[in-house]
Image: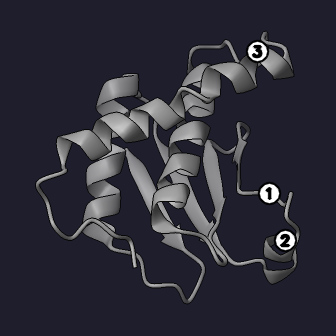
């Protein structure tokens, strides 16, 4: 269903990431494959308003900038971009205004909260 490509030197806890992606796929009812790329960008990270992530609908790919970011924030970005993937799969992304697409995708934050609440009893939940 998904491919994870870590293009960084940052060590990611693959088990937690896969658990989150499986949860997100189920909650969002995602049925089309996608890729998640982790990328470093020190210049972007130095910008207080730099990018955190992006979705490319032509390749069904999520790109997450991980330089100097907290693991939970990384998951939040993934959740946001996966909502865009779902919008695209449904044929809605191309019809929505940018504002509506972003407002809808902000539900990704709640998705992460649901995931977190479901694993509060798990002591090791970081991506580092």
Instruction: Give me the residue at 40% from left, 79% from top.
Output: 128
Mark 1 near mark 3, Cβ–Cβ under 8 Å? Answer: no
Secondary element type, mark 3: helix
Image quadrant occupied by the N terminus: top left
Pointer 3: residues within 10 angstroms few (<14), some, or many (20+)? few
Left or right: residue 2 compared with residue 56: left
The residue tagged 3 is 100
**Which residue has dot 2 on it?**
44
Identity of the residue drawn at 62% across and 42% down? 60
- Horizontal relation, residue 6 to residue 30: left or right: right
Closer to the camera, 27 or 37?
27
Image coordinates for residue 2, horizontal then vertical, percent: 42, 50
Question: Is label 1 in a helix, a strand or a loop?
Answer: loop
- Color scheme of the displayed model: one colour
In the displayed structure image, the side of residue 128 where residue 120 appears, left or right:
left
Secondary structure found at label 2: helix
Q: Earlier in the sequence, mark 1 or mark 2?
A: 2
Q: Contact (CB < 8 A) between labels 1 and 2?
A: yes
Residue 75 percent coordinates (x, y): 48, 54
Mark 1 → mark 3, Cα distance in angstroms: 19 Å
In this view, the residue in front, 79 or 37, is 79
Q: Position of residue 112 (x, y in %)?
A: 41, 41
Q: Residue at x 45, y 31 (%)?
A: 110
The disc placed on residue 51 is 1
Give the answer, above or below, for where 50 lies relative to 77.
Answer: below
Instruction: In this rendered view, identify the residue nearer to me: 75 or 22.
Output: 75
Q: Residues within 10 Å of mark 1 (few under 14, many from 20)?
A: few
Residue 122 in the image: above or below residue 111: below
């Amino acid at each position: 269903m998904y491919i994870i490509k870590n293009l960084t030197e940052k060590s990611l806890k693959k088990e937690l990431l896969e658990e989150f992606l499986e949860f997100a796929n189920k909650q969002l009812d995602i049925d089309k494959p996608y890729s998640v790329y982790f990328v470093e960008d020190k210049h972007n990270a130095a910008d207080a308003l730099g990018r955190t992530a992006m979705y490319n609908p032509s390749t069904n790919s999520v790109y997450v900038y991980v330089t100097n970011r907290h693991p939970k924030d990384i998951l939040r970005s993934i959740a946001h971009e996966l909502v865009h993937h779902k919008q695209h799969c449904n044929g809605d992304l191309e019809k929505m205004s940018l504002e509506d697409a972003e407002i809808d995708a902000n539900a990704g934050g709640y998705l992460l909260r649901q995931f977190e609440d479901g694993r509060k009893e798990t002591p090791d939940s970081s991506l580092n």
